[in-house]
Image: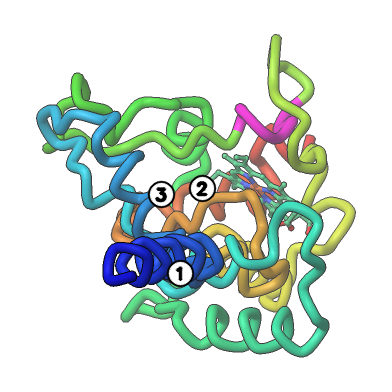
């Protein structure tokens, strides 16, 4: 009789164990542990890059067919817009020639890149920028003639600055990187890239 009870309670424990579905947090923590086990730190490429911030966590919840409610998207865009910083001198435009080099470079952040060298922005990997480009990606819309079409005024300059600094300010969970976030690009580099989009003499607007 005693053995029977023990056997039954063991069975009950087993069934209960199977029936408990892990919470979303547990699944996320386990997945992160599996991912971290699959990567090795090398140079400046540290494993903390796998840790999501609040924005990324929210975007992950609403991926894979789980549609994001409008009010969540609106909240994200408001928060991200509020996180944008502006240059102390108030000037949003730098040197478009320097900006073009930054936009056409995909270097930076990898274990074999010099951590002290400035990063590229890789804009060309997702956008067309000029007529002269031999190849470019099409994940993002073409930016050729960006200011010529939108206008060269201060509102469009500010929009271009904001978009490069934090793309989620206008498109929650955008696939465009947040270049002002964690200093991927320096303030001067963002000015130069914004000049590439906005300067009437830039090949973008020719
Ligand atoms: C990984 C791909 C990717 C990279 C790299 C990228 N973008 Fe984007 N970008 C996008 C996507 C996708 C959109 C459209 C969705 C959105 O607005 O977020 C976009 C939108 C934009 C817009 C808004 C266009 C409009 O018509 O309003 C601007 C401006 C822009 N990107 C500039 C840049 C610049 C400048 C760089 C480099 C500093 C860059 N992007 C790098 C993917 C990218």
Q: Can you tell which quarter of the image residue 124 is in?
A: top right
Q: Which residue is mark 2?
A: 193
Is residue 2 visible in the rendered image? The answer is yes
Q: Quadrant of the N terminus?
A: bottom left
Question: Label 3: few (<14), some or many (≥20) within 10 Å?
Answer: few
Residue 31: image tag: 3
Is residue 92 visible in the rendered image? The answer is no
Q: Can you tell which quarter of the image residue 73 is in?
A: bottom right
C-beta proximity under 8 Å, tags 3 and 2: no
The x and y percentages for residue 24 are 51, 69
Q: Quadrant of the C terminus?
A: top right
Residue 7 versus residue 187: which sits nearer the camera? 7
The x and y percentages for residue 16 are 48, 70
Side (left or right) of 142 relative to 109:
right
State yes or no: Cβ of the residue under disc 2 lies below 8 Å from any atom of ligand 1: yes
In magenta stretch: residue 114: no
Q: Residue at x 29, y 63 (%)?
A: 3
Q: Nearer the viewer, mark 3 or mark 2?
A: 3
The x and y percentages for residue 178 are 49, 58
Residue most extreme to the right = 149
In magenta stretch: residue 127: yes
Q: Nearer the viewer, mark 1 or mark 2?
A: 1
Side (left or right) of 19 relative to 62:
left
Specify the principal SS of the magenta part. Answer: loop
Looking at the image, residue 154 lies above or below residue 14? below
Residue 195: image tag: none
Q: Residue at x 45, y 49 (%)?
A: 192
Q: Which residue is mark 1?
A: 12
Identify the magenta region.
124-130
C-beta proximity under 8 Å, tags 1 and 3: no
């Amino acid at each position: 009789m005693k053995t029977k009870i023990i056997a039954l309670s063991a069975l009950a424990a087993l069934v209960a164990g199977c029936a408990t579905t892990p919470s979303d947090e547990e699944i996320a923590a386990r997945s992160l542990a599996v991912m971290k086990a699959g990567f090795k730190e090398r140079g400046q490429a540290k494993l903390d890059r796998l840790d999501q911030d609040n924005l990324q966590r929210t975007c992950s919840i609403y991926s894979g067919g789980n549609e994001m409610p409008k009010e969540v998207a609106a909240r994200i865009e408001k928060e991200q817009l509020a996180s944008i910083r502006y240059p102390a001198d108030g000037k949003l435009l730098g040197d478009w020639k320097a900006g073009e080099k930054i936009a056409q470079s995909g270097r930076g952040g990898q274990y074999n890149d010099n951590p002290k060298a400035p990063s590229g922005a890789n804009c060309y990997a997702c956008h067309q920028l000029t007529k002269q480009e031999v190849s470019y990606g099409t994940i993002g819309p073409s930016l050729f003639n960006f200011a010529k079409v939108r206008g060269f005024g201060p509102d469009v300059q500010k929009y271009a600055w904001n978009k490069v600094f934090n793309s989620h300010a206008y498109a929650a969970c955008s696939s465009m990187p947040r270049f002002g976030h964690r200093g991927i690009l320096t303030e001067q580099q963002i000015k130069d890239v914004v000049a590439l989009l906005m300067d009437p003499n830039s090949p973008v607007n020719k």
